[in-house]
Image: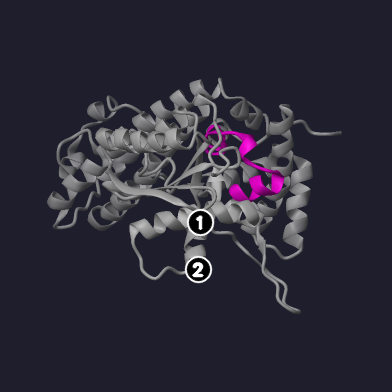
Amino acid sequence: MLNPVSLQLRVGVDVGSRCHTVAIGLSDGSLLEEFEIPHTAEGFQEFFARIEACGRRYPVPIAVAMEGYNGHIRPLDSLVRARGWRLFNVNNLKLARFKEIFPAAAKSDRIDTRKTLELFQLGDHLPMAGDVLQEVMATPAENDILKRLSRRRRRLVNERTRVLNSMQADLQAVCPGLLEITRDVGNLWFLNFLTCRRGLLKLARVRRASLLKVPGIGTHFANAIQAWQSRAYFAPDASLVGDMIQQDAARLLELKQQIKALEEQMAQVAQKSSIAGQLASIPGCGAICAAELAGEIGTVERFRNEASLALYLGMATLDRSSGKSRGSKAPRHVNARAKAAMMIAVDHHRKLVPQSQRYFERKRAEGKKHNQAIRALGRHLCRVIFKMLTQDRPYRIEP
């Protein structure tokens, strides 16, 4: 008879686009059940019904491990957490390495779920293997909202960059002289001018009185536009490409409004987040970076120490030495969004704090490149951030 006190009911989930493969086992290695569920409400009900049926046979704590937390597995992951079960996120990179070291006879979704259960067992005996299954800690609701909003904003910003580059290339090919009247193609007044008439060719005939009615265009820009109109040149395909340019300009105006609305919403939610408030106290860490980092960090309880936080934020490097060779490499399992926000915040921070600027200059004098020196300073700042979050205190500069 198995001792229920020492047991744990463990569930491994291999995530698919439309259905998921599930394996239920015990912490002693025995496999209880395997099945598939569709990614529907009925499938979720079957998932919980089968686990609870096993739980009645073995009244022990339940732990669920699945890949793609906050990804394709939504909303099943949030439903698991709502029931109070322990939830683990499978590190796909380390799981792949594990399957390379201990390969199975074949490859299937059911075999992958069994490998997940094996990782549970391996973590019981090898502490290093525990990093493969990362427990999902409860995070404040405001930080979850910030994560959704900041990721949505990042997608829109990336889309704006792509559309802007495409529109600028088309303008250069169709009407090169038009680019000379602005330093930034994404200026609000320039986009309003591009969309003030239906048809790119008609822009060369807009009168001064009409120009002054366009939002953002004053006397200075009206003079620049009229100077261009006197020498306006359009390529033969301007009528075709011109419609594309105006569509891109209209999309950029729409993206500006959507991004601004998201930033205002993020600012309101960030006022409720203690992590965002503490990060915002760091010189150079603006409201957007603070909100984005707060959303990606979620809770500091998920990190064992400051080194773990630095690795997650992409500010740490891994040792790569052999014999007399000494080197380092960038880790692959980092949060790319948090790293991008951290790089921007650190670069602004060192310009505002003399001590950080001197540290940055010293690293540059040692031969490090700009980004390497920024990461070195960011590694030091991660120690400060970890103490700020664990001790619940704002940033302050020691005299």
Q: Residue at x 45, y 28 (%)?
A: 83
Please name whichever residue, 186 or 324, is drawn nearer the observer in this view of the structure: 324
State which tag comes first along the sequence, 1 or 2: 2
Q: Residues within 10 Å of mark 1 (few under 14, many from 20)?
A: some
Q: Residues within 10 Å of mark 2 (few under 14, many from 20)?
A: few
Question: Toward which corner of the image does residue 291 lie, by quadrant?
Answer: top right
Q: What residue would you read off at disc 1?
A: 118
The stretch drawn in magenta includes residue 294? yes
The stretch drawn in magenta includes residue 14? no
Magenta stretch, main secondary structure class: helix
Does dot 1 land on a helix, a strand or a loop? Answer: helix
* Residue 350 seen by the camera: yes
In this picture the colour scheme is one colour
Amino acid type of the residue tagged 1 in the rendering: Glu
Q: What residue would you read off at disc 2?
A: 102
Picture coordinates of residue 247, whole percent (x, y): 21, 42
Picture coordinates of residue 280, whole percent (x, y): 63, 30
Does dot 2 land on a helix, a strand or a loop? Answer: loop
Question: Toward which corner of the image does residue 220 lie, by quadrant?
Answer: top left
Cβ–Cβ under 8 Å for marks 1 and 2: yes
Magenta residues (range): 291-314
Please name whichever residue, 275 or 52, is drawn nearer the observer in this view of the structure: 52
